[in-house]
Each structure stands twice: as structure tokens, then as C-alpha cells.
Image (cartoon, rainbow, N blue to C red):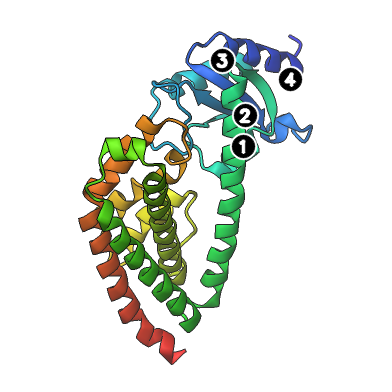
Amino acid sequence: MREESDANKIKRLAEYFKNRDDVVMAFLFGSRSNHRSHQGSDWDLAVYFKSPDGRLEIEKDHDYPQERQIRGNCIEILRTDSVDVIILNRAPATLADTAIRGIQLVIKDRRLWLEFMLKVTSQAIDYRQLVKSYAEIYWRSASLTLRDADALDKRLIFVNSEFEALKEYFSFSWSEYQGDDKKRKIVERTIENIMNACIDISKIILSSKRRVVPDTYREIVRQAGLIPPFTLEISKRLSDWVDLRNILAHEYLDYRWKEVRDFLENCGPTLQSFLDIAKKFLEENRVEAVKK
């Protein structure tokens, strides 16, 4: 029996995803998409599922039960077990950015695809810069250097300053958020500043201990909890707010308000604990830094 051509297999994949109501877009990427494949090459597929509320999902920390079924169906279509499927809703921005540059199998919503492409590309560029600075700290020493201790100190002071300023808005109401554009922008910008600085603090802590760089901003904050005296409980709660950086760019006020309100109502104890533990880490490791 004559071997089916890759071109024909790609057509059948496209037809399969076109007929799935839960798939918004799908791509073939990797060596099979750029003429560098050989007989044993994997089939790398990227799929974006329709979200329950129709809103954009990037690096969503969520399980998609249909993932296993899709891989099984694609194995049958391609007649090989060498099939890898990534979920674009959940994938790290750097991987998603690579995947959507491959062959378009189906795109059912051009507006969502454009929004996803613009945001994931921008986020991937930012993350690659973070990885570069992470590597610089990683290779400088197996512990905290004076330079990195100073950088950590400055970010802790900045977070504390922004945190104190935000306390004025802890009782911020929906009517104020909706009706006072100036105050809304102050609150959103302050929250974004705090989360960006917490990511930087977690980056310095992890890289100074020469831990492997995580794949996402969320994982950088979460894995800082593995470094004493940090705890997973604090870092996990803080990492849940990392997505606020994407949510605050969303056009719908009611959608943003839900997450902003959660942060304002619950961030106090978590941020204070994070700051106290980070200061303790700095003091414990500053002595080592001075010796270098």
C-alpha cells in the first residue's frame, strides 16, 4: 500500500479541526511545517479551545479534558504515535508564539486570532528579555552578589511603596471603578507595578540559587516558594494574580473589576507575608554577598 503524502495528511487534519465545534484555531508547527522533517519526525500540533465565556485565554492554568481525545484522533489520522499536541490557551507565550508561526490548519475567528497573536508575541518578547536577565544572575554566582542584593532591595522598597499607596483604594467600589477613570487607572497601574516587581523579586531569588528558569511568569513566582524561607502557600496565592497583567488589558470593565476586587480584598496578608519573607531572604543572603 502506497504511503499517504504529508500534504494529504495535513488536509485531513485541517478538515478534522474544522469540524470540531470546540476548536477555534489549530496549527502544525515544527519540522513538519518547514520542510525539515524526516520519516521519524514528530507531528507537532497546537490547538486553541473555545473558552466558556468567549474571552481570550493566554497561559491559562487549566485542564482541558478534550485534549486526550484530540491526540488520539490525530494519531489515527496520521497513523503514527509520534504526535504532540499543545494547548494554546495554556502554553507558555514563547511556545505559543512559535506554534502560531507554523501552518494554519484552521482559524475560525480572525479577530480572536489577531488579538492572540499580538498579545502572545509581545509577551514572548518580554519573557525572552527576562530569561536573558535571569541567565546573567544565574551565571554570576551560586549565591546572591552585591549587585543582585541591591537590585532585590530596590524592588522590595518599590513594592512596599506601591502597596502602601494601594491601601487607600482597598474599599474601592464598582461605582467608583466604573465612573472615575482617573482613579481606575491609578489602581490598575499600581496593581500592575506590584505584580511586575514581584515577578522580578522571584526571578532574582530563583536565579541567585541557580534554579532552572521556569517557562512562565506564573511559574517563576510559584517556584520561588521552593526557596527557604519562602512557602508554597504564599507563592501559590501570589502566582494566581500574575494573570492580572493580561486581564487589566481587557476591554470589558466588568471582567476586569471581578479580578481587581479580588486583589484589593485579599492581597494585604499575602503581599505583607511575601515582603517579610523576601526581606528575611535578603538579610540571610546579604552576608554571603558582602563576602564575595
Amino acid, disc 4? Asp
Name the residue carrying label 2.
Answer: 114
Whole-angstrom CA distance, mark 1 to mark 2, is 6 Å
Kind of element beneath mark 4: helix
Amino acid, disc 1? Leu
Instruction: Report whether 123 appears left or right of 256.
Output: right
Q: Residues within 10 Å of mark 2 (few under 14, many from 20)?
A: few
Instruction: Report whether 44 appears left or right of 277.
Output: right
What residue occupies the far bottom of the structure in this picture? Answer: 291
Name the residue carrying label 4.
Answer: 6
Residue 261: image location, x then y, percent: 28, 41
Residue 186: image location, x then y, percent: 40, 51
Kind of element beneath mark 3: helix
Label 4 vs 3, first from the N-terminus: 4
Q: Looking at the image, do the residues carrying marks 4 and 2 touch, with CB atoms under 8 Å apart? A: no
Amino acid, disc 2? Leu
Amino acid, disc 3? Glu
